[in-house]
Structures are given as structure tokens and as C-alpha cells.
């Protein structure tokens, strides 16, 4: 299963410098107010990337009977939030502080997400209605998930292209996108561990898990220290404080992920640890994103 997010450490920098960060080539500068509105939209669109992985992780963990009740409730909430935000990004939602989208390229990107979400949505609703997961539903979610993630990422890309292109604003946009993507990667690793245990394309799942770990680790260091080659500035004191708090959480999570990678298996204890560690790190990375 091709997965453009599962890359070697060397490829990480190319990914970090790509798509969304090509905005530097675009002319024009958004007003301060417009920039703040777009920052909020980028944050919510970036959260959609995370929710694609959280929904899938919830399905697979529940199928494995790993904290089943927790993951079925997680599935219900993540599914509802993704669906509402997708509609809000297009048509507006006062509670989400979203106005209707008018930018044609972004509307087209949202339409592409709508198409794949329709099938994803039906499968998840069937699971929630029954409270159990059938083998063909695992297969369907596993195969649809990478496309839904890819198309959700393209929405983020179109939004970053709308933001102002002064050097300072570009640096903030790059940092916001990388930090927001970290939220997604916490859930993607959990999802890939579950797929490995389920036995879905084990070689590909194993490689994907390694790549996701490496991207998270490289991105964490880049966020902490800045990376001039992709115009990623050093963090503000507030963001640095959150990233420093995340260090210990990532060390614990990485240790569990490394054990799974090295052995090729995940014990019940590993799954339970990942269930907690992924969510603790997600919460802290979300706190960091909200400091932008």
C-alpha cells in the first residue's frame, strides 16, 4: 500500500519542504485579520488529517479487543467531528468559527474529500450501528484510509497557499503545518501497529510504521531547533515549552514503537501502552499547535 507519509529520514526533509510549503512562490500578502482566519482554517483542516488516522486506529483497536469500549466511543466522536468539520470548511459553522469557503481550489479539494468520505462514512456508520467490526470492514477502512489522508492533506495545502507570503508569515505557516501534522502522526503510528497485529499487508505495515516514527522524530527536532532549509524558524518560547513537555512523552511512545518494530509483534501490554501514549502525546502536540 503506497503511503507518501511513510518515508526514510532523508525523505522527511523533502516532504517537509514540499506541497504546502511551495506557498513561498505565490505572490501577495494576506491582511492580519485574513491571516488569522486562515490560520484557524489550517488548524482545523490539519486536524482532519489526524482524524482520518484516529478513526481508522479506533476501528482496528476495537477489532483487536484492545480497550474496545474506549475505541468505539473514540470512533463515534472522531467520525462525528470529521463529518461536521468537513461540512463546516465548505459551508461554514458558527460553533467552529468557520465561514463558508469561497476559494475555488480549496472547494475542489474539499469535493475530492467528500467523494472518498462518502464510502468511509457509510462503513463507519454500519460499525457504530452494530457495535462490532467485520473482516471486510477492516479491509475497506485499511484501503480507503491512505487516500482519505492524502486528500485531506491537499485541503491543508490549498489553504496554506492562500496565506500571506512575507518571510515571517511563511515561517509561521511552515511551523504550524509541521506541528499540526505531528498530531496526525501520533495516531498513524497506532494505526500501523494495529494493522501489523491484524496481519494486513504485514511487510508494508512494518515499513510504514518505521517511516512514520522517523518522520515524527525528525519533525520534532526541526520544530525544536528550526530548519532554515525549509524556512522553519525556531519556536516561540510558548511553543518551545510545549515541545519540551512532549519530549518525555515521545521518548516513552517511541520506546514502545521501537519494540514493535524490532520484534514485528505487539503484545496486549504494548497495545494498551500505545492506546495511552498516543493520546497523551496527541494532547500535548495539540497544545503546541494552539500556541501558533
Image (cartoon, rainbow, N blue to C red):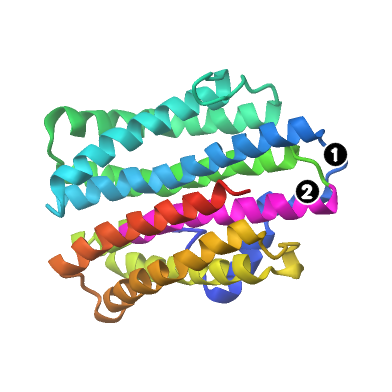
Residue 129 in picture, x, y percent from top left: 16, 27
Q: Are marks 2 and 1 in contact (CB under 8 Å)?
A: yes
**What span is colored magenta in the figure?**
166-190
Examine the rendered structure and indicate whether residue 6 appears above or below residue 52: below
Binning the other alpha carbons within 10 Å of mark 2 as few (below 14), some (14 to 19) or many (20 upward) gives: some
Mark 2 or mark 1, earlier in chain: 1
Q: Where is mark 2, residue-wise?
A: 169
Q: Could you tell whether 119 is left or right of 227 in the image?
A: left
Residue 45 in picture, x, y percent from top left: 54, 38
Residue drawn 14% across and 42% down? 134
Residue 192 in picture, x, y percent from top left: 33, 60
Binning the other alpha carbons within 10 Å of mark 1 as few (below 14), some (14 to 19) or many (20 upward) gives: some
Q: Which of the image's four quarters has the N terminus? A: bottom left
Q: Secondary structure at mark 1?
A: loop
Quadrant of res 268:
bottom left
Badge number at residue 29: 1
Amino acid at each position: 500500500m503506497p503511503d507518501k507519509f511513510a518515508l526514510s529520514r532523508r525523505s522527511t526533509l523533502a516532504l517537509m519542504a514540499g506541497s504546502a510549503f511551495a506557498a513561498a512562490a505565490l505572490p501577495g500578502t494576506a491582511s492580519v485579520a485574513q491571516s488569522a482566519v486562515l490560520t484557524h482554517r489550517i488548524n482545523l483542516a490539519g486536524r482532519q488529517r489526524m482524524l482520518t488516522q484516529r478513526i481508522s486506529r479506533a476501528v482496528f483497536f476495537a477489532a483487536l479487543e484492545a480497550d474496545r469500549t474506549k475505541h468505539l466511543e473514540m470512533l463515534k466522536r472522531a467520525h462525528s467531528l470529521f463529518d461536521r468539520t468537513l461540512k463546516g470548511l465548505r459551508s461554514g459553522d458558527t460553533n467552529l468559527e468557520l465561514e463558508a469557503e469561497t476559494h475555488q481550489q480549496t472547494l475542489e479539494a474539499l469535493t475530492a474529500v467528500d467523494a472518498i468520505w462518502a464510502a468511509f462514512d457509510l462503513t463507519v456508520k454500519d460499525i457504530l450501528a452494530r457495535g462490532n467490526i467485520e473482516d471486510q470492514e477492516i479491509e475497506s477502512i485499511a484501503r480507503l484510509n491512505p487516500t482519505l489522508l492524502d486528500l485531506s492533506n491537499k485541503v491543508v495545502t490549498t489553504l496554506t497557499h492562500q496565506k500571506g507570503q512575507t518571510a515571517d508569515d511563511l515561517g509561521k505557516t511552515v511551523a504550524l503545518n509541521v506541528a499540526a501534522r505531528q498530531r496526525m502522526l501520533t495516531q498513524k503510528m497506532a494505526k500501523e501497529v494495529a494493522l501489523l497485529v491484524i496481519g494486513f499487508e504485514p511487510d508494508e505495515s512494518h515499513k510504514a510504521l518505521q517511516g512514520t516514527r522517523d518522520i515524527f522524530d525528525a519533525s520534532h527536532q526541526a520544530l525544536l531547533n528550526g530548519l532554515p532549509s525549509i524556512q522553519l524558524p525556531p519556536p516561540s518560547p510558548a511553543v518551545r515549552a510545549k515541545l519540551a513537555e512532549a519530549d518525555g512523552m515521545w521518548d516513552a511512545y517511541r520506546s514502545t514503537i521501537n519494540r514493535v518494530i524490532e520484534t514485528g509483534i505487539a503484545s496486549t501490554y504494548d497495545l494498551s501502552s500505545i492506546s495511552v501514549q498516543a493520546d497523551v502525546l496527541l494532547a500535548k502536540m495539540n497544545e503546541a499547535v494552539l500556541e501558533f
